[in-house]
Amino acid sequence: MKYIITERQLKLISEQSMTGWGNYVPQGQQKSVVKGWDKALTSHDMNVFLGIVSVLIPVIGPFISSMVGLGDAARHFQEGNKKAATIITLFSLIPLSGKLLGLIPELNQVGVRGSVALAEKLLSKTRLTPVEVQVVKKVATNKNVIQAELKTIEGLLKSVEPSITKYKDRYIQKFGEQKYKQLLSNYISQQINSDQFNQTISKV
């Protein structure tokens, strides 16, 4: 199933910043429940969540190019809708990091396609499932750890970017997407170093 983010939803996410979201939520609801969502999710949760997204936007390109299964994120990125692309990529990236997945194990249940659906729900303020609510709340709760880890991952990816650009497609063609995801996850989780990653991905 292909999830489509409407023009109205794209406009919302393009215009909303950490403070912009607060302006979008009616003033009377600023300290209470965000209308349309589960009662466990507040505007504060969304402010913190969108703050993390804003930090990631300037460096989202290498994250998208290094991963697989992010056609929707790549499309939004190419169209200039970087916040939409960033939300999808963030939800898809966390499961590749052992450290972050330990903080938000619910993302394993959501999956890549579910990440696209969750991004759409956040944009349209559609009611979230209990699992989706927990994902957003835990991202907000673990803001500092997530931002620090993303900075580390950014540095790791930069050091192997030439190899990913040169060999990723051929590696996937020969060994499959799952094998590549595992290789990338092992590297991001620092179970292997850059030399080991480069040696492995070049065996095509």
Image (cartoon, helix red, strand yellow):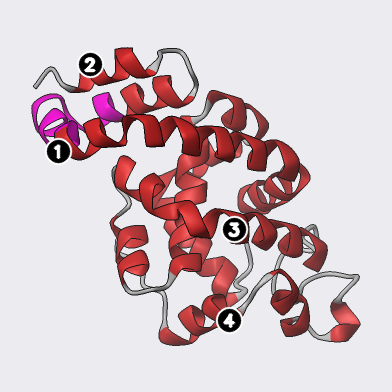
Identify the image quadrant of the N terminus: bottom left
How far is disc 2 from disc 3 in space, using C-alphas?
Answer: 31 Å
Q: Residue drawn at (10%, 33%), measured in percent from left and top? A: 170
Say what amino acid the circle numbered 2 marks: Thr
Disc 4 secondary structure class:
helix
Q: Relative to 158, does residue 185 appear above or below in the rendering?
A: above
Q: Are marks 1 and 3 in contact (CB under 8 Å)?
A: no
Sequence-wise, the earlier of marks 1 and 2 is 1
- Which region is colored magenta? 167-180
Residue 17, by quadrant, is bottom right
Say what amino acid the circle numbered 4 marks: Glu
The local crowd at label 2, few if under 14, some if 14 to 19, many if 20 or more residues have their Cα within 10 Å, is: some
Disc 2 secondary structure class:
helix
Dot label at residue 53: 3
Residue 42, by quadrant, is bottom right
Q: Relative to 65, does residue 102 appear above or below in the rendering?
A: above
Say what amino acid the circle numbered 1 marks: Asp
- Main secondary structure of the magenta stretch: helix
Which residue does the numbered mark 2 point to in the structure image? 200
Say what amino acid the circle numbered 3 marks: Val
How far is disc 1 from disc 4 in space, using C-alphas?
Answer: 34 Å
Sequence-wise, the earlier of marks 1 and 4 is 4
Q: Residue drawn at (50%, 58%), measured in percent from left and top? A: 58
